[in-house]
Amino acid sequence: MSALAKSIGARVWSRDGDVDETGLKGRYDATMFAAAMALLVLGTLLVFSSTVRTGLSAKYGHDPFYFLTHHVIHVAAGLIAFWMTIKVPVRWWLKAWPWVLPISVVLLFGVFFVGESRNGARRWFSLFGITLQPSEFVKVGFALYLAGYLAKRKALVNNLLMGIVPLTIMFVVVAGLLVFQPDVGSVVLLGALVVSMLIVGGTRFAFMGVLFGLGALALVAILIYDPEKMSRFIGWMMIDETRLGEGFHIWNSQIVIGSGGLFGEGLGRGLQHVLGYLPEAETDFMFAVASEEIGFVGVVCIVLLYVVIAVRGFALIRICRDDFTRFLAFALTLLMSLPALMHMMVGLGLIPTKGLVLPFMSYGGSALVAEMVTLGLVQRMHLEATRGLGDG
């Protein structure tokens, strides 16, 4: 690259068609990164305070630091995954997206044969003491696949037979494998992702109506097929009547949220979840834990941090330079913000329990690593999108 090209920030094309950007300066999105790190630090504190209780301590060898130790290990693994992801050029992902779906299907199939079963669900691989939940990474992979598919077939987004039907078939395959694990929460999230991507892609609203109808029928079929899901749905519809049964989680979640008041009980002082009235507090009901310990003011701050991540992610779309990165930025931003919204709605009893963690805050290895990979991808796109744009 010539000195003149470097000085004016011009793009110089190499012989193989790739862009030589060695001399161009880009920047990461420091605001988004700071918001995510703030959630990560606060989540670590809340994981510790929500897991130091007698029942859990006795279950795991009376070690009050069991969950904190493992969470810190997960955070370290997530930071390593983040660092590795930001080193990968976006053009590599552009070339790799067609392989994402087959790999995802193989992983989801493999769970049924060599996976580990917990609480009636078979979602995990366990190897040399390391547990991996493929569905968490399938979400990121499916976002890549959607971005590549819509960028390549943008002209066919309004063609039902050539554009919508193939994508719907792909989604049904992945969703079917997730349903049988079962992991309905991930199915709902991926369904929302597909619908949102098609809307921004310019699909006719008539097609969206058909997809909504098919989705509603699929959910009804799941409820009929799975009595446990049906009872959970009834528990959500009739929380007061089922507060000692299927509505137990949501009923207690609402109590925990309400007990926090304006400023909360203080970190580590949340009485309701410490006494064990809220099962899975460190994962599925982290929002309730936060509400009790840091109160309404603290929860508002958490919501604002997620809003910052969403706003910065959507702002990235405006400076992306091709359809693939625009679609990918939109999809990954949804993956970091939509689960947070759904998690909070579950805690408030607005939707049935989904088993979705609170991004960057809840306890969980695979989910946290996948979230950091998502953040790394967005940061890498921001770095490349701002190269040659100056400091403004």
Image: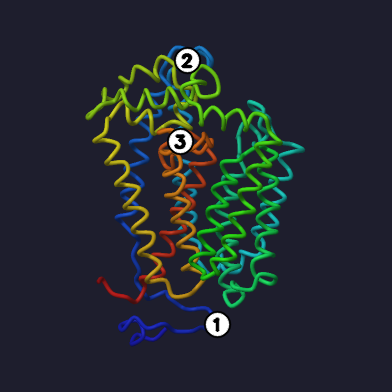
Q: Residue at coordinates 49% horizontally, 54% vertically from top-left?
A: 84
Do labels 3 and 2 touch, CB within 8 Å? no
Residue in the foreground of this view, choosing between 48 and 355: 355
Q: Residue 238 placed where, x, y %?
A: 50, 27
Q: Quadrant of residue 130?
A: top right
* Picture quarter with the C terminus: bottom left
Report whether residue 127 is seen: no
Which residue is the site of mark 1?
17
- Amino acid type shown at disc 1: Gly
- Amino acid type shown at disc 3: Val
Relative to 230, residue 185 above or below? below
Residue in the foreground of this view, choosing between 232 and 66: 232
The mark nearer the N terminus, 2 or 1, is 1
Which residue is the site of mark 2?
57
Q: Residue 371 placed where, x, y %?
A: 47, 47
The mark nearer the N terminus, 3 or 2, is 2
Which residue is the site of mark 3?
346
Q: Residue at coordinates 30% horizontally, 82% vertically from top-left?
A: 7
Q: Residue at coordinates 27% horizontally, 30% vertically from top-left?
A: 295
Relative to 262, residue 378 above or below? below
279 on left or right of 160: left
> How far apart are the alpha carbons under marks 1 and 3?
49 Å
Q: Residue 326 placed where, x, y %?
A: 46, 68
Q: Secondary structure at mark 3?
A: helix
Relative to 262, residue 332 above or below? below
- Tag nearer the camera, 2 or 1: 2
Crowding at mark 1 (Cα within 10 Å: few <14, some 14-19, many 20+) = few
Please tell me the numbered disc located at residue 301: none
Crowding at mark 3 (Cα within 10 Å: few <14, some 14-19, many 20+) = many
Q: Residue 27 placed where, x, y %?
A: 33, 65
Do labels 1 and 3 touch, CB within 8 Å? no
